Image: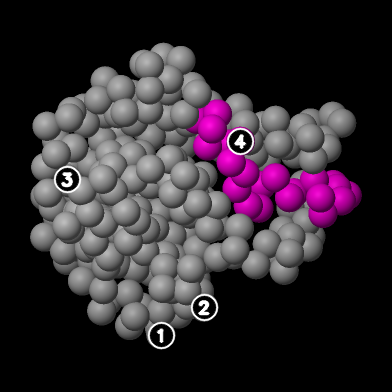
Amino acid sequence: MQDRVKPLSGVRNFRDFGGYDTPTGRIRQGLLFRSGHYNDATDEDIVFLNDLGVTFHVDLRRPDERDRQPNKWPAESVVMIASEGGRQETPAHVAALQGDNVTADSIEGYMTNYYREAPFKEHHVELFRAWFDGLEAAQGASVVHCAAGKDRTGIICALTHLALGVGEEDVFIDYDLTNTAVDIEAHLPLARDRFNKMLGQNHEADVYRPFMGVRNTYLENAFEAMSAEHGSPMSYAENVLGLTSERRDILKKKYVES
């Protein structure tokens, strides 16, 4: 894990998601990165990030999220993609915490439903398309991120791995790295205190646990929803995102080394 997860003090979950084996070789490292937001990036973090040669950057967050926590990186010279769609005055996860009988199980149910719906949200489709378009054109490294770098980012990185030929076992291994890349036990009481204060609630820390990490069942549900509508995740990618087999071959030639 250590060569994937980069030690940034102000950016959570920053990691290289290359290096996995495929039937024809291995995904190149140093070209595909994923993370949380960059609002808390330190000067030292920015020096490190600037040395990566990133030329393409996709921010999967909603505009209200970007307004609250604007990125400090990358510089304007990098091609940056974001969507103006999906703005929420009250984020759905906040609403889920304000309902009656909020429990860890109810929040896990919310997360499961979120993963089933996320691949079909209009602004996600727009950004997922832009990610694959940009990977074809990128002349350097690429970064995709959301707020915590685990859910929206987890879905698009899993699709990227599948498109490049990574086996499903490794897809889930990489997805699950969030649970070790982020010190969930350290962040859990902080999240409890912040959300309880914001919401005027008194939820136990475990209520927030389903939000803090990832669970394989979440991604499994995203894949199941794609398959229910289109037959498989890659058929979803082709039918919804325009990622044809010909385009996948182009990406493999670019990002897979023999």
The reply to whether residue 147 is visible in this rendering is no
Q: Depth check: give the residue in front, 192 or 6.
A: 6
Please name the residue shown 61% across and 58% down the image: 179
Please name the residue shown 66% across and 53% down the image: 212
Instruction: Tell me the tag on residue 251.
Output: 3
Task: From the top left corner, tell me how far across and down residue 232 is, in percent.
Answer: 38, 22
Give the number of the mark in front: 4 or 2.
4
Please report whichever mark, 3 or 4, sits nearer to the chain's N-terminal start.
4
Please name the residue shown 53% across and 58% down the image: 177
Is most of the magenta stretch helix, strand or loop? Answer: helix
Q: Amino acid at mark 3?
A: Leu
**Magenta region includes residue 206:** yes
Q: Amino acid at mark 2?
A: Ser
Q: Depth check: give the residue in front, 46 or 24.
A: 24
- Say if mark 2 contacts mark 1, CB within 8 Å: yes
Number of marks in picture: 4
Where disc 2 sits, the SS reads loop
Query: 60 above or below 227?
Result: below
Tag 2 residue? 9
Task: From the top left corner, tell me how far across and down residue 68 is, in percent.
Answer: 51, 55
Tag 1 residue? 44
Q: Residues within 10 Å of mark 4 (few under 14, many from 20)?
A: few
Where disc 3 sits, the SS reads helix
- Say if mark 4 contacts mark 2, CB within 8 Å: no
Q: Residues within 10 Å of mark 3 (few under 14, many from 20)?
A: many
Q: Depth check: give the residue in front, 207 or 233.
A: 233
Q: Amino acid at mark 1?
A: Glu
